[in-house]
Amino acid sequence: MLVAPSILSADFGILAKEVVAVCEAGADLVHVDVMDGHFVPNMTIGPVVVQSVAEVATKPLDVHLMVTDNAFFVELFAPLKPGYISFHYESEHHHHRVAQKIRSYGISPAIVINPATPVSVLEEIVKYVDMVLLMSVNPGFGGQKFIPIYDKIKACKELIEAKNPDCLIEVDGGVNDENVRKLKEAGADVVVAGSYVFGHKDYAAAIKSLKV
Ligand code: DX5
Ligand code: ZN
């Protein structure tokens, strides 16, 4: 399992230190939650702050856009050269266009669906992305209760095997050492973990416990 700590639960007063710490503790990606206060009822950080994260991160950034205007935010974040930029199916009319725009910058595109959105909507777009992110909480906040989406992960795995076998499945929200094994069995390749990792006093031990 690849592990992407979400810096949403980091101490923003010492953000650079936190990013260095999770990278040294075995993170595979650094998950950056970008919220615009429109698509979700919360706001987080923009490119100025993420620039400081990018400068110290020794692992690729995994930028999760939770915004209404995806094309605009892709333009803002592309210069920081993240490994992935993911955008929500629910907030976009032109999925293919946004995926191609992300790829045109040499960045891997990923598409995200909310817990109540069925996997079937991904049928046409899945061949144009490198990762599908399945939300296991409603986006907007860290520290929420995990929604069991195991059947969705299995359905997504089947779709990916048929249409784009190299595409990864990432799960985001309420992930911890108790559900990670079942997520792996269902077909997840990457887990995002915010409060679980940053709430642990030993980041390396927390990350290790997710590497099932
Ligand atoms: C929720 C975010 C998540 C969040 C996860 O909108 O997309 O990445 O930080 O936090 P935990 O792991 O605490 O649920
Ligand atoms: Zn996220």
Image (spheres, grey):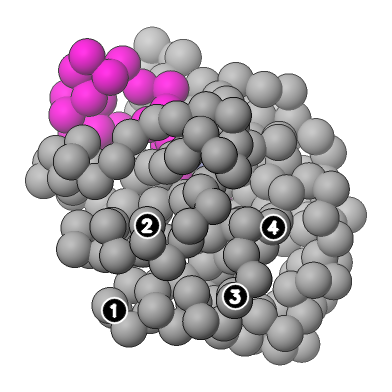
Residue drawn at x 53%, y 59% as measured from the top left: 87
Q: Which residues are magenta?
A: 1-25
Q: Nearer the viewer, mark 1 or mark 3?
A: 3
- The residue carrying mark 4 has its beta carbon less than 8 Å from ligand 1: no
One can see residue 71 in this view? yes
N-terminal of the pair, mark 2 or mark 4, is: 2
N-terminal of the pair, mark 4 or mark 3, is: 4
Q: Which residue is mark 3?
A: 95
- The residue carrying mark 3 has its beta carbon less than 8 Å from ligand 2: no
Q: Which residue is mark 1?
A: 106
Q: Is residue 47 left or right of residue 69?
A: left
Instruction: Say few, some or many: other residues with alpha carbon within 10 Å of mark 2 (under 14 / 14 to 19 / 20 or more).
Output: some
Where disc 1 sits, the SS reads loop
Place residue 39 in its image quadrant. top right
Q: Is residue 3 left or right of residue 82?
A: right
Q: Which residue is mark 2?
A: 73
Question: Please, is residue 166 above or below residue 25 in the view?
Answer: below
Q: Which residue is mark 4?
A: 90
N-terminal of the pair, mark 1 or mark 3, is: 3
Q: Amino acid at mark 3?
A: His
Residue drawn at x 51%, y 34% as measured from the top left: 37
Q: Amino acid at mark 1?
A: Gly
